[in-house]
Amino acid sequence: MKLQNNYKLFFILITAFYCNSIWAEEPKPKLLVDVGYHLDNNTFPFVSIFTKSKIEKKFIAVPNISVKVYLGQEADANLLGTVITNKYGKGMISFPVSVNTLWDTLSQFKLIATSVAGKKYESVSNEVSLTKAKIYIDTLWADGVRSIAVTIKIKSGNEWKPVKDVETKIVIKRSVGNLSIGDKETYTTDSTGKATAEFTKVGMPGDAGGNIIIVGKTEDNELYGNISLERKVKWGTPLVNVNTFDQRTLFATRDKAPLWLLFLAGFIFITVWAVIIYLFLQIIKIRKAGMENWPDIA
C-alpha cells in the first residue's frame, strides 16, 4: 500500500512539473511590419518592407521573414509578390506588369503586407492607404539668382491637380549623403502645389561638364509616401582631372617623393646619428678622465 502511494505521489509531481513548464513558457515576441511606398522619377513604383520586434524596450531588425504584399485587398489576384527580409530586416518588391491595368485606374490605393507565421513569430499584417502623386522640377533664373521649383500633383479622376502643404526636400545629390540647395532643410508647397528654393551652393563641384544632380522628394509622407525626381543642371564647377603621376607628390612612388619629405627624413637621420656619436665620444672622454685621475681603478 505504501509503495502504491509513492507511485501516485511521483506521478503527481511529474504531472505538476510538466504543467508548470507549459504555463511558464514565454509568449512569442510580437512582430511588426513597416510598409513603404516609393516612386522614383515618376516611373513604376516599388514597395519597401521592414520587419522588426521590440525586445527589452528596443526595436531590433528581424531577418528571414517571408512577407506577402497585396494591392487593394488581400487576394491572390492582387498579390504583388513575396519577399524574404535580409539580415537588416529589409526587403523590396517592384510592381509586376500584371497589375498595370489595375494600377492605371487608381487614384487612391491601399498596400497590405502580411507576414508568414513561423516558429518564433505569428502572422501579422499592416497596411497603408495613399493617394497617387507625382513630382516635377523646374529651374528658375531671375535677377542673377538661380532657384529650383518643385511641384507636387495628385491624381484626381483622370486629372493631375497641384496640392498644397506638402513638405518636400530639395537637395544636391552627392556621393555620400545629400546637401540642401538652400538654407532650409525642407520646403512646403503653396496653393499652386509649388515649393521654391534659392540655389545658394555656388561653386559646388560637379562632373567634367560642371553638371550636378538636383533631387526633389518627399520622405515618409502619410498621404503620398516617398516620391522623388532627379534633374541634372549645369550649375557646378567643372571637375578638372589633374594627372600627377610623373610629379613629386606625397602619394607617389619612392623615386617621386617630395623634396621637402626627403630633406626632413635626411635631417632626422643625421640628427639622430649625430646625437649617438656625440654621446659615444663623451663616454670615451669620461673613461679617459677616470683612468688619468684614478689609475689604480683602471
Image (cartoon, helix red, strand yellow):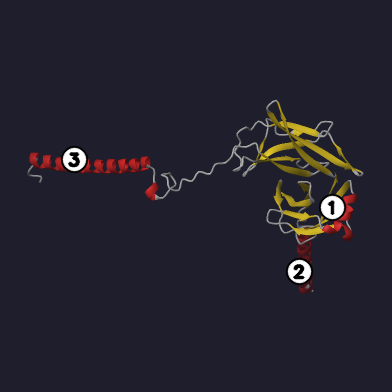
* 211 w.r.t. 68: above or below: above
Q: Position of residue 208 (x, y in %)?
A: 59, 43
Q: Which mark is residue 16?
A: none
Rendering quarter of residue 130? top right
* 107 w.r.t. 201: above or below: below
The tag earlier along the polypeptide, 2 or 3, is 2
Question: Are discs 2 and 3 less than 8 Å apart at CB?
Answer: no
Q: Position of residue 251 (x, y in %)?
A: 44, 46
| Amino acid at the residue labelled 1 | Ile
Closer to the camera: disc 1 or disc 3?
1
Identify the residue shown where x is 27% and y is 42%. 270
Q: Position of residue 162 (x, y in %)?
A: 85, 36
Location of mark 3 (residue): 282
- The residue carrying pointer 3 sits among few (fewer than 14), some (14 to 19) or many (20 or more) residues within 10 Å by Cα, namely few
* 81 w.r.t. 274: above or below: below
The tag earlier along the polypeptide, 1 or 2, is 2
Q: Which mark is residue 112?
A: 1
Which SS class for mark 1?
strand
- The residue carrying pointer 1 sits among few (fewer than 14), some (14 to 19) or many (20 or more) residues within 10 Å by Cα, namely many
Residue furthest to the right:
157
Q: Give me the C-alpha separation between circle 1 and circle 3.
A: 87 Å
Location of mark 2 (residue): 10
| Amino acid at the residue labelled 2 | Phe
- The residue carrying pointer 2 sits among few (fewer than 14), some (14 to 19) or many (20 or more) residues within 10 Å by Cα, namely few
Query: From the viewer's perspective, is 43 left or right of 173?
Result: right
Query: From the viewer's perspective, is 211 left or right of 150?
Result: left
**Residue 32 seen in the current view:** no
Q: Position of residue 78 (x, y in %)?
A: 87, 57
Which SS class for mark 2?
helix
**Residue 270 seen in the current view:** yes
Question: Are discs 1 and 3 less than 8 Å apart at CB?
Answer: no
Q: Nearer the viewer, residue 212 or 293?
A: 212
